[in-house]
Amino acid sequence: MPESENYKKGREIRRQLMGDAMVQDMAATTYDNPTMEKFGNYASEAVFGMLWSRPGLDLKTRTLICVISDTSTARWPELAIHLRMALRQGWTEDELGEVLLHLSGYIGLPSVREAMIIANEIFQEVASESAGE
């Protein structure tokens, strides 16, 4: 099947958001079977190629929307991915922490507590990865 323009655009945006190492790791672990490979290809085309590339919002803002949405809907594995993306797009740990704290008044402390635990783990992982470069 030929690659559509949206698929190509989506792969590039995904690489921008995640970085080469994360894209390669996900290809070798999460998308290493035919079922998940189809899902990954669809996500690249439809979500990253069509949605993330729309005009009107920059990638930095879009990553913050995902962090907020994941926290509000308790999508913890996705939150870890989107926090990494948000850091790559220039959000600081302090800013992301403040966003999560702000949510506590709207979605409740238990969800924000879980999000903060995940954020702390991701912040430590990213710092460790950066120190090892």
Image (cartoon, rainbow, N blue to C red):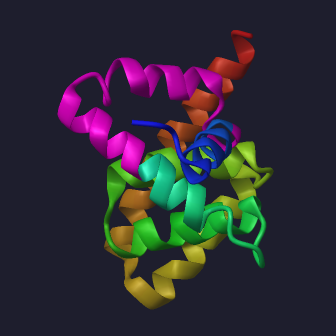
How far from the left and from the top, in percent, is residue 26? 42, 27
115 vs 31, left or right, is: right
Residue that appears at 47% across and 37% down? 2
Magenta region includes residue 48: no
The correct choice, above or below, for 106 with respect to 96 in the image is below
58 vs 38, left or right, is: right
Residue that appears at 62% across and 30% down? 126
**Position of the N terminus by quadrant:** top left
Magenta region includes residue 26: yes
88 vs 29, left or right, is: right
Q: 42 or 82: which is nearer to us? A: 42
The correct choice, above or below, for 124 with respect to 105 in the image is above
How far from the left and from the top, in percent, is residue 127? 67, 27
The part of the chain drawn in magenta is 16-42
Name of the residue lying farthest toward the front: 2
Residue that appears at 58% across and 53% down? 6
**Position of the C terminus by quadrant:** top right
